[in-house]
Image (cartoon, rainbow, N blue to C red):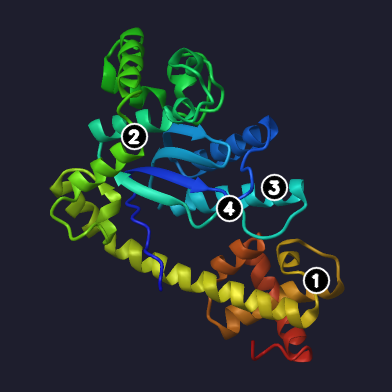
Amino acid sequence: MPRKARLSVPGSVTHVMSRCIDGLALFADDDDRVYFLRLLSMYVQQTNCRCYAWSLMPNHYHLVLRTGEHDLWRTMKPLNTRYAQYHSRKCGRRGPLFTDRYKSIVTQDQNYVQELVRYVHLNPVRAGLCKSLTALDSYHWTGHAALMGRRVNDFQDLDAVLRGFGKDREVSQREYRKFLAQGLETVDGDHLVKLVRESNASREKGRGHDCWVIGDPDFVKKVLKESVAQRLRVRRSGAEAADLNAVAETICRRLGVPQDSLTVRHRGGPESEGRKAFAFVCVRNRGIATRQVADFLRVSPGAVSNMLRSGQVIAEERKLLSV
């Protein structure tokens, strides 16, 4: 059954959540959390995103992001990929790290954004990682401490959140904290589901794309209308990703090399041959965009183009043209 396309309209605010597969800790120690935040900062700034809220939990994380001119996946895909690679190297394991693609809900500001900021930042209290709101004020692994002026995060947009609570910084911080305190008894997963259902009250059973939109009817319609072209791009991108994985699996099996060797540069040997043959088969035989292949191999599009001639020779010699 095909997976639903992401709703991601440039300039929209989105709640993002990604969970680790069963039995694994996404963040085993503070080094893991620091590395993840370093990646988050880098990709948020590269894609001109604005981060309103974030929370790192033992086996999952939450973000509230406003996208810039780029679709959300341009921030999320490299973030999750790079962190998964780091996690695999550190733990000496193979296989996926996350249960599925990240989950996302497009939201309408200002009240809806405030609700989600509160929901995300109260996660450590609800999970018992912080015993009280006072403990949360200085807790390192959410964006709440930065909003309270206790920490500095270069990737977090504090003003955009605090403006909704007052013009003066001290007043807005006080009102924001009072808003969080009010949510200690009321804001949980069911509260978030209620927001989605209220936003989509006239939609059938919440199974369409719009069940992942929170906002008034006009906003829901706007997001759906503006997302048509993006959904088509995602559908094509998803098909190409599946094609890339299938080609990688077949070529590596025939050459007797591990599949993850395709994403590492080698000086000769079957691993190097596999990368070049993979590039040729994907670009010339499958018609996959050079940019997609470059992202998969973690090289530039120019490097992929340089692989094609020798890749053709290798594919012919190793009988890989039919892959």
Measure how far apart labels 1 and 2 are at the Cα level: 46 Å
Q: Amino acid at mark 4?
A: Ile
- Residue 21, numbered label: 4
Measure how far apart labels 2 and 4 are at the Cα level: 24 Å
Please provide percent x and percent y for residue 248: 66, 74
Looking at marks 2 and 3 on the same chain, the residue that comes earlier in the sequence is marked by 3
Q: Residues within 10 Å of mark 4 (few under 14, many from 20)?
A: some
- Residue 86, numbered label: 3
Residue, disc 2: 116
Looking at marks 1 and 4 on the same chain, the residue that comes earlier in the sequence is marked by 4
Q: Quadrant of the C terminus?
A: bottom right
Q: Nearer the viewer, mark 1 or mark 4?
A: 4
Which residue is painted at 60% across and 40% down in the image? 39
Looking at marks 1 and 3 on the same chain, the residue that comes earlier in the sequence is marked by 3
Say what secondary structure mark 2 lies in.
helix
Q: CB under 8 Å between callouts 1 and 2?
A: no
Q: Residues within 10 Å of mark 2 (few under 14, many from 20)?
A: many
